[in-house]
Amino acid sequence: MPHRLSSSTASSSSSSSSMPRIFKIDRPLFKHRYDAHPSDGGASLYVHNRPITNNLPDLTLHGGPDAASPVVAVCHMLHFSQNFKIGLGDPSAADDAVRWEDMIKANVSGTRHCWAMDLPALSSGGDMARRMFVWKRTRKVAVEGMKTSGLSPRNWKLLEDVDGGGEGEGEVLAVFTSDISGGKAGALQVNVDFGGEWESMVLITCLALYERSRRR
């Protein structure tokens, strides 16, 4: 996939020399899209933002710089809910081309959202396991070289949710820091390399939270 910036072999540690990876994310004024620019100079990613869905995805992540690039992930923002339906793959392709996952509000205030996917198990051996994660709103953790702004509630850190309680623990796997400048959304820093689908999932879930917050 053109967007895949990490190695093709998933890793269960953050020791990769290419980490962390930072995406500068623009939201051009009066345009229905996001542009994610990777820090290594690789191809930008295009995310179409559909304000009126008509049962189509609210967000569509393309593995390249424009809408002609292959679709790699989509997001449906469920009506009258703070939950999301995330799809890895292209819904317009074959019926089995998409793997659907849920991102669910984990607390009453909506400052935590949980999701899961199949990844290499924490134990060695290369076995796959269901692993759970939680995006938590933060005022302290920021992308390298940035600071969180008290004017924005759109700052999150991603932790592994080992016990499924929605709290998360351990190292920060990814962090998003908002930028209140015109035409900017912020920056997403991915600290571990769990493979290309992981990277797509992190990006689409982060932008889902950002866009839901922006639409309120």
Image (tube, rainbow, N blue to C red):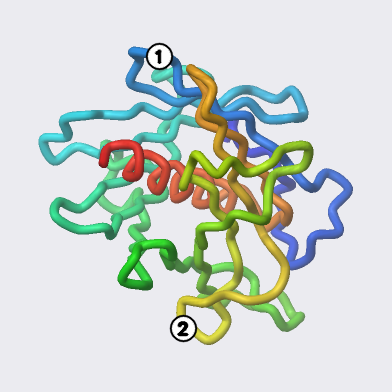
Q: Which residue is found at the position 32% from the left and 29% from the top?
A: 49
Earlier-in-chain disc, 2 versus 1: 1
Disc 2 element = loop
Between 61 and 24, the one lying in front of the other is 24
- Left or right: residue 50 versus residue 15 is left
Kindly tell me whether residue 117 is visible in this rendering.
yes
- Amino acid on which the number 1 mark rests in the picture: Leu
Q: Which quadrant of the view contains residue 70?
A: top left
* Residue 54 screen position, x and y as percent: 11, 35
Between 133 and 60, the one lying in front of the other is 133
Q: Return the mark for residue 207.
A: none
Query: On screen, 159 above or below 81?
Result: below
Answer few, some or many: residues within 10 Å of disc 1's Cα (few below 14, many 20 plus, some between 14 and 19): few
According to the image, label 2 marks what residue?
A: 165
According to the image, label 1 marks what residue?
A: 29
Q: Which quadrant of the view contains residue 131?
A: bottom right
Looking at the rendering, in which quadrant would you find the C terminus?
Answer: top left
* Residue 36 screen position, x and y as percent: 56, 28
Residue lying at the far top of the rendered structure = 30
- Left or right: residue 24 versus residue 35 is right
- Amino acid on which the number 2 mark rests in the picture: Gly
- Left or right: residue 15 versus residue 99 is right
Between 97 and 88, the one lying in front of the other is 88
Q: Determine the CA span between mark 2 and mark 1.
A: 38 Å
* Residue 192 screen position, x and y as percent: 72, 56
Q: Which residue is found at the position 45% from the left and 39% from the top?
A: 72
Whether tag 2 and tag 1 are in contact, CB under 8 A, the answer is no
* Residue 20 screen position, x and y as percent: 77, 46
Query: On screen, 83 above or below 88?
Result: below
